[in-house]
Image: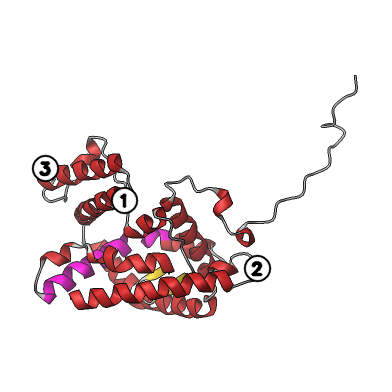
Amino acid sequence: MRRALTLSVLLAGLLLNAGCATVREARGGPGQRLDPWENWNRKVFAFNETLDENVLKPVATAYSNVVPQPVRQGVDNFFGNVADAWSAVNNFLQGKGGKGFHDLVRFGTNTFFGFAGILDIASDFGLEHQYEDFGQTLGAWGVGPGAYVVWPLLGPSTVRESAALPLDTAVSPALAFNDGASKYSITALRIVNTRANLLGASRVLDDIALDKYTFVRDAYLQRRRSLVYDGEAPLQDLPETDLPPAAPAAPPTSASAPANN
């Protein structure tokens, strides 16, 4: 397990260097510099869509129909409680001590009074969830996102988020179990429960997106950028080719022209 994690981190580091160089060298229209591997990404995206349509979505639908919503909410809370502990670590790594302490209090409250996080007691006291992952920490340290990449099974990512992925995915309740069957069961429960929560959103996306790949890519990149900057991303940091062209100023009309005195 440790050896596989080490190899994953090394591979992610190589991808980070290669991906950033690729983004610097790529040229083209808007969005092209962020997606230099679009041809390959679209193939992986199509594979993931097929897998989701034929396997994951039917399983998630059956799970949603059988398992009552309060139970599914409890599963969400349980995994979210573990995420709060990891969020505290990342907030401290980013130098945000106040937010890190907030996450620790939230984690402790739900762990001890919410039956290991099954009940979200902390939110009732105004301690809202504010998840930070290691990809956001790398961004706060000044690491650029690099090229957009779509991974089989895992979905959309960037080179930076791919480098953080081994650590972010390793933080799971499954690590508390030594036998493989328990690890796989908890991981499968997390995946299916998450997919069940997205059933409504996926139906809306299917209805409104003319090019689903582009829609998902742009939404993912914008969301990750907003998370890194805590919702205050500076416009000047955007690559120039990725900014939409400014609309020409309209000439003043007679109604809007200032009157001569």
Q: Earlier in the sequence, mark 2 or mark 3?
A: 2
For marks 1 and 3, give the CA distance: 20 Å
Q: Amino acid at mark 1?
A: Tyr
Q: Residue 190 colored magenta?
A: yes
Q: Residue at x 26, y 62 (%)?
A: 193
Q: Earlier in the sequence, mark 1 or mark 3?
A: 3
Badge 3 is on which residue?
Answer: 113
Q: Amino acid at mark 3?
A: Phe
Q: Quadrant of the C terminus?
A: top right
Badge 1 is on which residue?
Answer: 131
Q: Quadrant of the N terminus?
A: bottom left
User: Could you tell whether 247 is left or right of 59 in the image?
Assistant: right
For marks 2 and 3, give the CA distance: 53 Å
Q: Nearer the viewer, residue 77 or 231?
A: 231
Residue 130 placement (x, y as % from top left): 32, 46
- Choose top left, top right, bottom left or bottom right for residue 79: bottom left
Q: Quick check: 80 above or below 149?
A: above
Q: Residue 121 colored magenta?
A: no
- Residue 73 showing in the rendered view: no
- Choose top left, top right, bottom left or bottom right for residue 200: bottom left
Q: Amino acid at mark 2?
A: Gly
User: Could you tell whether 254 is left or right of 182 in the image?
Assistant: right
Residue farthest right in this picture: 260
Q: Quick check: 131 above or below 180?
A: above
